[in-house]
Amino acid sequence: MKLFSHLTDKDIFIESFKNFMAKRLLSEKSESIDYEKCIVTKLKVNCGRTVTDSIEGMMNDLEIAKDKAKKYKEHRSTTQQAADPIDFDIKILTTSYWPSYKTFELSVPPEIKTCMDSFQDFYTRLPTNHHRELKWNFAMGTAFVSAKIPGTGKTYDLIVSTYQMCVLYLFNFHSELSLADISEHMGFDEETAKKNMQSLMTGKARILSHDNGKFKVNAKFQSAHRRINFPVPMLEEAVKKERIT
C-alpha cells in the first residue's frame, strides 16, 4: 500500500485489481479470502468507501451464493424430483458489482440444461425473487469433463471453461467440424471460435487436431497426467480492459 500511495492513476490500478480479483473469486483460486478482505480494507482507508463498494459487493455476493446453493441442494433432497444428472454448482451474482464479460447464448448439453431449468424453477418460486430476472452468463464458468480418447482408449479429466466444454461436446456427435460449423453450433463470432479452438490445441495439451480446414479429436492424444488444465482464452472485452491498464 506504500507504493499505491505514490501512484498517479489510482483508478486504473483499482479497476485492474477488481478485474483480477473477480477472476480469482469466480474460479475459486484466491489463496486467502481474509487476505483479499484485508487489501480491500486498506483501499477503503486510502480511497474511500465509494471506491470499494462494488468490490465488497462481489465478496458479499459469493457468501450469499453459497447459502443459496445450499438451499437449492436441500430443496432437491427433500423433494421427490430426480437428482441432477451432473454435479452442478451455480453462483448468483449482482450485475452492478461485477466486471462485464462477453457472453453468448449457448446451446448447452442436455444434462446441463436440465440442471439450469431445475434451478430456474427453484429460484423463481422463492418469494424474494418475484421481481428479479435471472440471466445466465457462461463467460467465467468452469467444467470438469471426463474424456475417453478413441485412438488410445485412455481417459482423462479435463478442466475447461464452459465454452470449451460445449465445443468438446459437439465431437460426441460429429467426427469433424469446420470453424464455421462450430461458430454456428455455438453462436460464436469467428474470432471467439478461433480463440476457443486454439486453446484446445496447445503444445502441452493438443486434444483436437486441425487438417484441411476441419477440426477433429486427436486420436493420438497422450499425456503423462490424468488431470489436464486447459488455458482459458481471453475474450475481446477482457483484452480491451487489459490494454487500457
Image: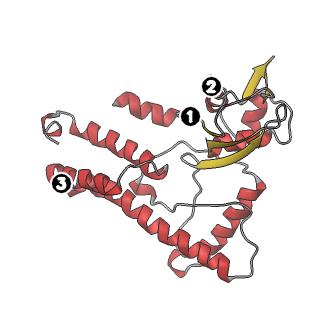
Mark number displayed over residue 202: 2
* Residue 229: quadrant of the picture: top right
Quadrant containing the N terminus in the rendered view: top left
- Classify mark 2: helix, strand or loop: loop
Camera-side mark, 3 or 2: 2
Q: Identify the element where label 3 is drawn.
A: loop
Residue appearing at x 56%, y 45% in the figure: 139
Q: Which mark is residue 86?
A: none
Quadrant in which residue 37 is drawn: bottom left
Task: Answer above or below: position of 88 versus 235.
Answer: below
User: Is tag 3's residue or tag 1's residue first in the polypeptide sequence?
Assistant: 3
Identify the residue at the far top of this view: 212
The image's colour scheme reads secondary structure
The picture places residue 186, in percent across and down from the top left corner, at: 71, 41
Cα–Cα span, label 3 and label 1? 36 Å
Callouts 2 and 1 close, C-beta under 8 Å: yes
Of mark 2 and mark 1, the one earlier in the sequence is 2
Q: Which residue is mark 3?
A: 48
Q: Which residue corresponds to the image point at 78% horizontal and 38% vertical from the top-left?
A: 154
What amino acid is at disc 1? Pro
Q: Tell me the amino acid under the disc marked 3.
A: Gly
